[in-house]
Amino acid sequence: MATHLPHIDDIPKAVWAWLVKRKLTYDTHLYTPEKWRARGEKYGNDALFTITTEGELNHILNYPESKHDFKVIDDFSKFLKKLGVYYEQGHAWSLHFYAAR
């Protein structure tokens, strides 16, 4: 049975909705490739989209302390895999998303 992957333009919206549902959007921002490149940042300029975070998401990804934190990381990775993307951190506060297809 084939898995239906969302259109590439819908993936940032799906990721953002996942974060909203888990209340992980405080001090977190989503950038299109154009808006990210306009910042003049060193990393992630070829990403599908970028998320910056200095809130709870940043803390969970960089300093996991509890079973809950590790579960969030695992669930996030599984969710991204289903979407056909993965992320790399450019800085501790930036996540750059790329197609895994």
Image (cartoon, rainbow, N blue to C red):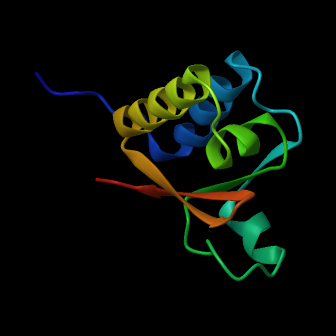
User: Residue at the spot x=59%, y=34% of the render?
Assistant: 15
Please state the horizontal and vertical placement of residue 7, each as a whole percent of the image.
Answer: 44, 39
Please state the horizontal and vertical placement of residue 84, each as a whole percent of the image.
Answer: 36, 43
| 84 vs 72: above or below | below
The one of 64 and 20 positioned closer to us in this rendering:
64
- Farthest front residue in view: 65
Q: Quadrant of residue 91?
A: bottom right
Please state the horizontal and vertical placement of residue 32, each as a whole percent of the image.
Answer: 70, 57
User: Residue at the spot x=61%, y=42% of the render?
Assistant: 12
Q: In the picture provided, is 9 more to the left or to the right than 35?
A: left
Q: In the picture provided, is 10 more to the left or to the right than 33?
A: left
- Farthest top residue in view: 21
- Count of numbered badges drawn on the protein: 0
Q: In the picture provided, is 70 more to the left or to the right than 22?
A: left
| 70 vs 44: above or below | above
Q: Quadrant of the N terminus?
A: top left
Please state the horizontal and vertical placement of residue 86, each as a whole percent of the image.
Answer: 44, 50
| 50 vs 40: above or below | above
User: Residue at the spot x=67%, y=37% of the render?
Assistant: 60
User: Residue at the spot x=55%, y=37% of the render?
Assistant: 10
| 29 vs 83: above or below | below
